[in-house]
Image: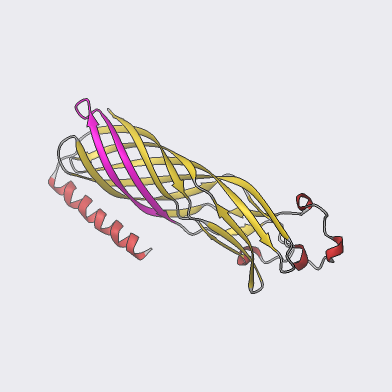
Amino acid sequence: MKKLLTLMAIILCFHLSSLAQESEIKSYFVSAGVGASNPLGEIELIRGNRKVVRTQFANAPSYTLEIGKRINQGSEVSLSIGYANYTYENKEDYTDGFRNYSSDDFNFIPVFLNYDLIFGQGSWRGFFGGHAGIAFYTKEVNLLSELHLLNIPQDQWPSHPNELTPLDLEIQNSFGIGIHGGARRDFFEGKMFVELLFSTTYSQFVAKILNDPEDDGDRDVELDTNPVDLGINLGWRF
């Protein structure tokens, strides 16, 4: 986190110096793209001193829409909105060998303010920048319940895993900060461009169990999601 903040400060210094040296260029752009996203995330439900449920996320396609403005020859700012639908698998293992696995999905929608530095000359140019904003979730995550911790005798457990009562986990919207970079190719005298993009985001999320029978709230939940994206965008300047 400290390294990212330091890098963002360096980028801001470059931005201020470039503004002092170059006049503003009124050049707007819009772009859209698709990529592959790895959420690098896992939810662990903790009961006492044991972690009893692991929820692992899978890779998913990601989509981005961005609109921005060229500040000068070497920098630009933009606002972007993304979308990814992550699937996940719950794995609940009991000490007596009983197992119950299930899967579900949730939507991840980041809205970020971006700042980019542009490097090089010619048709191919490099860019590097930072982004910060809010990540929204539009669906609850359902964890499985651990019945033997609810003082329910084993002979009264449901006979089929689908009859187990889930724990509904509400993920709060979170602040995110990250870096991105890549290479850009201009066409049609700079009016159109295609870019190859790498992006990584750091965020820590607060989660609340809505129907927690132990009434421990988010103290039972460890949640970490730090997406890494590789993608391609197509844009138009006007």
17 relative position to 42: left or right: left
Report which quarter residue 97 is drawn in: bottom right
Confirm whether the magenta stretch covers residue 143: no
The percent coordinates of residue 111 (x first, y second) are 44, 44
The percent coordinates of residue 27 (x first, y second) are 24, 33
110 relative position to 236: left or right: right
Q: Which residue lies furthest to the bottom in this view?
A: 49
The percent coordinates of residue 110 (x first, y second) are 46, 45
Give the number of marks.
Answer: 0
Report which quarter residue 35 is drawn in: top left
124 relative position to 216: left or right: left
Q: Residue at x 82, y 55 (%)?
A: 158
In this view, 179 is above or below 153: above
Q: Which residue is drawn at 67% across and 67% down?
A: 216
Range of the magenta residues? 177-202
Q: Residue furthest top?
A: 188
Q: Nearer the viewer, residue 189 or 102?
A: 102
Q: Nearer the viewer, residue 211 or 54?
A: 54
The percent coordinates of residue 228 (x first, y second) are 41, 50
Q: Which residue is drawn at 38% across and 41% down?
A: 231
Confirm whether the magenta stretch covers residue 185: yes
Quadrant of the image containing the N terminus: bottom left
In this view, 157 is above or below 127: below
* Snapshot colouring: secondary structure
Quadrant of the image containing the C terminus: top left
Q: Which residue lies furthest to the front in this view?
A: 97
Q: Main secondary structure of the magenta part?
A: strand
Q: Which residue is drawn at 63% across and 46% down?
A: 104
In this view, 156 is above or below 77: below
Q: Residue furthest left?
A: 21
